[in-house]
Image: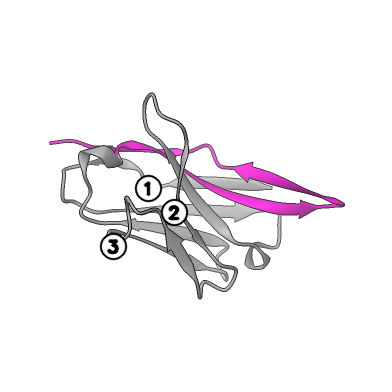
Amino acid sequence: VQLVESGGGLVQPGGSLRLSCAAFGFAFSSYNMHWYRQAPGKEREMVGTISMAGSSTNYANSVKGRFTISRDNAKNTVYLQMSSLKLEDTAIYYCSATVRDGGSWSTYWGQGTQVTVSS
């Protein structure tokens, strides 16, 4: 299993950015996918989740109405569209999946992509 994030960068407050997470090595369309973030000096927090078919999403209150998670199961990719970015959105963003591997469940993480919101 491998998750590879991309799309991070430097953006001004109020700007937008789209992150991508390409998944390899498991049946992507059979699992919910998650986005997390970790700001400097803070614990990792969940940003949001998308269901297997993409029909259901939920978000942390801090990003609700500004961030949108989507997925393309044909491309084994999940996206995080971020709009109206704030200084406090600065963090490393990770995608994650909990995958059934043999008889047990394992949680996998990507390497993360840095998002910096600054004027």
Residue identifier under label 1 = 7
- Name the mark nearer the viewer: 2 or 3: 3
Percent across and percent down for residue 18 are 34, 55
- Total tally of numbered discs in the picture: 3
First to last magenta residue range: 90-119
For the residue pair 51 and 28, the one nearer the viewer reads as 51
**Residue at x 44%, y 54% (from the top left corner):** 20
Q: Amino acid at mark 1?
A: Gly
Mark 1 and mark 2 residues within 8 Å of each other at the beta carbon: yes
Please identify the dominant SS of the magenta region. Answer: strand
How far across and how far down the image is residue 53, in percent? 57, 73
Q: Secondary structure at mark 2?
A: strand
Type of the residue with mark 2: Ser
Q: Callout 1 environment at 10 Å: few (<14), some (14 to 19), or many (20+)?
A: some
Determine the secondary structure under disc 1: loop
Residue denoted by label 3: 65
The image quarter in which residue 80 lies: bottom left
Left or right: where 3 falls relative to 6: right
- Give residue 20's mark: 2
Task: Looking at the image, tell me whether mark 2 or mark 3 is earlier in sequence order.
Answer: 2
Reply above or below: 66 against 29. above
